[in-house]
């Protein structure tokens, strides 16, 4: 398929336009089949997230069967995280409508998460003056959102403006979390030596979050 086309496996929905891409995920606007109105947002997560992961495991002496099992287990963990988010009912996360896991022809997996469409914080306030009250509300909403993610056993791990959305009443929502169980599985299965890794905070304000993430990984 072309770079600007994407087949959606969720019944009744189709991908509309790409919004962002990285090496491990894509985000698309979405609409109901037969409609021109964009009302949804698709997040497509690639598992494994890193292209060289299978090669690294082979270099470590893992059999092809064990590598396949490891990737499949990671995919199932991410699916459970997505389903937990859908069931959470949090008002500080984008409303999730459906979650699907599909295996691709190359043996990788794709996790499809369909949520209600919201503009990003940057797009919503484009050309508008942002008051101190708005920034305070943003801070409070993000604190609540991080707490809601923790309540379902997740550390968000990517609190940045590109992952902040605004709903119809102006409240801020925090989306696109990292799937910590994917990373935890590596350590639970003793695929790597804990002593070889450390979690580093990018700034002083992220120290507490980095510490929590490290504790979940038993590092």
Image (cartoon, rainbow, N blue to C red):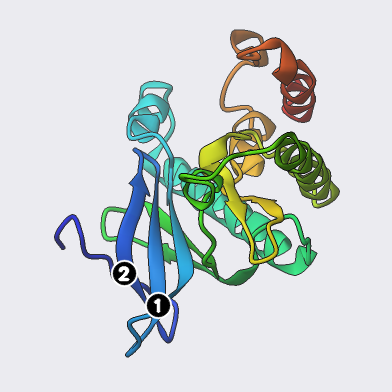
| Element type at mark 2 | strand
Mark 1 Cα-neighbour bin, 10 Å: few <14, some 14–19, many ≥20: many
* Residues tagged 1 and 2 counted as in contact (Cβ below 8 A): yes
Who is closer to the viewer here, 6 or 107?
6
What residue is pinned by disc 1?
31
Percent of width and height locating residue 125: 54, 47
What residue is pinned by disc 2?
16
Percent of width and height locating residue 42: 45, 63
Q: Earlier in the sequence, mark 1 or mark 2?
A: 2
Residue at 73% of width from left, 17% of height from top?
A: 205
Q: Is residue 191 left or right of residue 169?
A: left
Q: Which mark is residue 161?
A: none
Who is closer to the viewer here, 147 or 132?
132
Position of residue 116 relative to residue 129, above or below, is: below
Residue at 71% of width from left, 55% of height from top?
A: 171
Position of residue 86 relative to residue 192, above or below, is: below
| Element type at mark 1 | strand
Q: Is residue 91 left or right of residue 179?
A: right
Residue at 42% of width from left, 25% of height from top?
A: 61
Mark 2 Cα-neighbour bin, 10 Å: few <14, some 14–19, many ≥20: many
Of the 4 image quadrants, the one containing the C terminus is top right
Q: Quadrant of residue 88?
A: bottom right
Percent of width and height locating residue 26: 38, 51
Residue at 62% of width from left, 39% of height from top?
A: 130
């Amino acid at each position: 398929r072309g770079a600007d086309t994407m087949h959606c496996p969720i019944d009744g929905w189709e991908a509309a336009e790409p919004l962002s891409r990285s090496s491990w995920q894509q985000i698309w606007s979405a609409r109901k089949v037969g409609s021109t109105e964009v009302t949804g947002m698709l997040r497509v997560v690639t598992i494994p997230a890193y292209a060289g992961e299978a090669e690294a495991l082979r270099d470590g002496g893992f059999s092809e069967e064990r590598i396949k099992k490891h990737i499949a287990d990671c995919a199932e963990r991410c699916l459970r995280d997505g389903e937990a988010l859908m069931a959470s009912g949090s008002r500080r996360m984008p409303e999730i409508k459906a979650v699907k896991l599909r295996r691709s022809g190359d043996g990788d997996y794709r996790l499809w998460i369909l949520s209600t469409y919201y503009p990003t914080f940057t797009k919503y306030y484009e050309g508008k003056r942002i008051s101190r009250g708005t920034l305070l509300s943003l801070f409070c909403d993000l604190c609540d959102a991080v707490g809601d993610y923790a309540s379902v056993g997740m550390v968000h791990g990517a609190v940045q403006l590109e992952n902040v959305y605004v709903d119809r009443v102006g409240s801020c929502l925090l989306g696109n979390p990292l799937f910590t169980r994917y990373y935890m599985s590596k350590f639970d299965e003793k695929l790597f030596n804990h002593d070889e890794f450390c979690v580093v905070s990018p700034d002083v304000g992220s120290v507490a979050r980095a510490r929590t993430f490290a504790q979940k990984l038993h590092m």
